């Protein structure tokens, strides 16, 4: 069963995107379908989810137009699931997730896979670049200002069928971004990280932006410190209070969030325009990020990439 809570928060394309696809099982399903796992049975096996949770998330992802269901000829009761234009457009985001996963974790199967760019014929690493100055986009070089759509969002927080299982136990052979999903796929952890890029470090500042129960916020901050995303730095002794400062590992998640924000601007917005405008301080232009090949500097699109196994 699912029910709905509502709350107002500052309009944000990241929040809008997360409200659609940010729960851990939805992220895992999209990742698996992207890697070619298409039937209910295969998804059940690959994700290790219960039937109930899987069917709940598949329905939800169809509803938000991130998956489409196709009946198989002669077997209409066993459909296959496919990416839509909207979810295919998350490819930039998926590549940035993969980068982070590879930089901070090791997985023998995943490490064997290399990406070949058909445009230049070379093995490449995807890099988030500014289309204006061509430099790599780093968290420290971005400034934020309210955009035309800077209003408040009434958010329908769906409380969905839950599963206590950890994503790290998911048996999926690919598990391309399981550590990333473990970090960002819990309710509110991604919101907390996204706020940290705006320079927010203290409990009360996070609390002002996220009207959630104090014990939940405190739990999420501790979790992110334990995962090495934040370093907690004591700033007063009595009572003990901490600054939560992004680590190198936390800062390295920025391209994932930036591409999520751009996706949210494109697919989850309303007519009023983007809630936030980003400036690239390296070149002082309005920031438009694009994932490019580090070998030929062309924009990387899904159908121009081939996976090859290292021997
Ligand atoms: Zn630039
Ligand atoms: Zn290339």
Image (cartoon, rainbow, N blue to C red):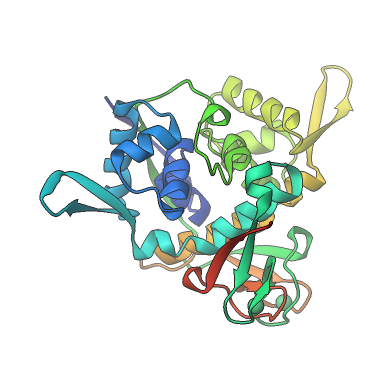
Q: Quadrant of ligand 1?
A: bottom right
Rendered view: 311 above or below 78 = below
Q: Position of residue 52 (x, y in %)?
A: 29, 27
Is residue 243 among the parts visible in the rendering?
Answer: yes
- Residue at 80 percent of width and 29 percent of height: 242
Q: Is residue 101 left or right of residue 248?
A: left
Q: Position of residue 196 (x, y in %)?
A: 70, 45
Q: Position of residue 148 (x, y in %)?
A: 48, 68
Quarter of the figure that contains the C terminus = bottom right
- Residue at 72 percent of width and 42 percent of height: 106
Q: Position of residue 275 (x, y in %)?
A: 50, 61
- Residue at 55 percent of width and 37 percent of height: 210
Quarter of the figure that contains the N terminus = top left
Is residue 276 among the parts visible in the rendering?
Answer: no
Counting labels gives 0
- Seen from the viewer's position, the closer of residues 186 and 11 is 186
- Residue at 76 percent of width and 79 percent of height: 283
Q: Is residue 140 left or right of residue 69?
A: right
- Seen from the viewer's position, the closer of residues 160 and 51 is 51
Q: Is residue 76 left or right of residue 180?
A: left
**Which residue is situated farthest in the top direction here?**
238
- Seen from the viewer's position, the closer of residues 98 and 191 is 98
- Splitting the image into 4 quarters, where does residue 217 fall? top right
- Splitting the image into 4 quarters, where does residue 261 fall? bottom right
- Seen from the viewer's position, the closer of residues 25 and 64 is 25
Q: Is residue 40 left or right of residue 100?
A: left
- Splitting the image into 4 quarters, where does residue 177 fall? top right
Rendered view: 199 above or below 216 = below
């Amino acid at each position: 069963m699912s029910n709905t809570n509502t709350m107002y928060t500052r309009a944000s394309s990241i929040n809008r995107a997360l409200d659609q696809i940010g729960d851990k099982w939805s992220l895992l399903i999209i990742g698996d379908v992207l890697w070619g796992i298409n039937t209910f049975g295969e998804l059940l096996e690959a994700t290790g989810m219960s039937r109930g949770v899987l069917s709940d998330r598949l329905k939800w992802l169809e509803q938000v137009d991130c998956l489409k269901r196709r009946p198989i000829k002669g077997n209409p009761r066993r459909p296959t699931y496919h990416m839509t234009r909207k979810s295919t457009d998350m490819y930039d985001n998926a590549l940035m997730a993969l980068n982070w996963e590879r930089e901070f974790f090791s997985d023998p199967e995943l490490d064997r896979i290399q990406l070949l760019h058909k445009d230049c014929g070379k093995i490449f690493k995807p890099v988030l670049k500014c289309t204006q100055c061509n430099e790599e986009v780093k968290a420290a070089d971005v400034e934020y200002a309210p955009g035309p759509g800077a209003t408040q969002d009434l958010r329908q927080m769906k409380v969905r069928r839950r599963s206590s299982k950890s994503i790290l136990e998911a048996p999926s052979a690919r598990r391309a971004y399981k550590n990333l999903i473990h970090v960002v796929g819990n309710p509110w952890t991604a919101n907390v990280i996204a706020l940290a890029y705006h320079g927010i470090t203290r409990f009360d500042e996070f609390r002002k932006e996220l009207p959630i129960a104090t014990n939940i916020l405190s739990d999420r901050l501790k979790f992110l410190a334990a995962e090495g995303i934040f370093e907690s730095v004591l700033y007063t002794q009595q009572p003990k209070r901490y600054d939560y400062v992004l680590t190198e590992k936390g800062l390295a998640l920025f391209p994932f969030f930036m591409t999520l924000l751009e996706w949210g601007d494109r697919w989850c917005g309303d007519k009023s325009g983007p809630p936030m405008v980003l400036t690239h301080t390296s070149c002082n232009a309005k920031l438009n990020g694009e994932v490019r090949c580090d070998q030929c500097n062309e924009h990387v699109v899904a159908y121009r990439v081939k996976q090859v196994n290292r021997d």
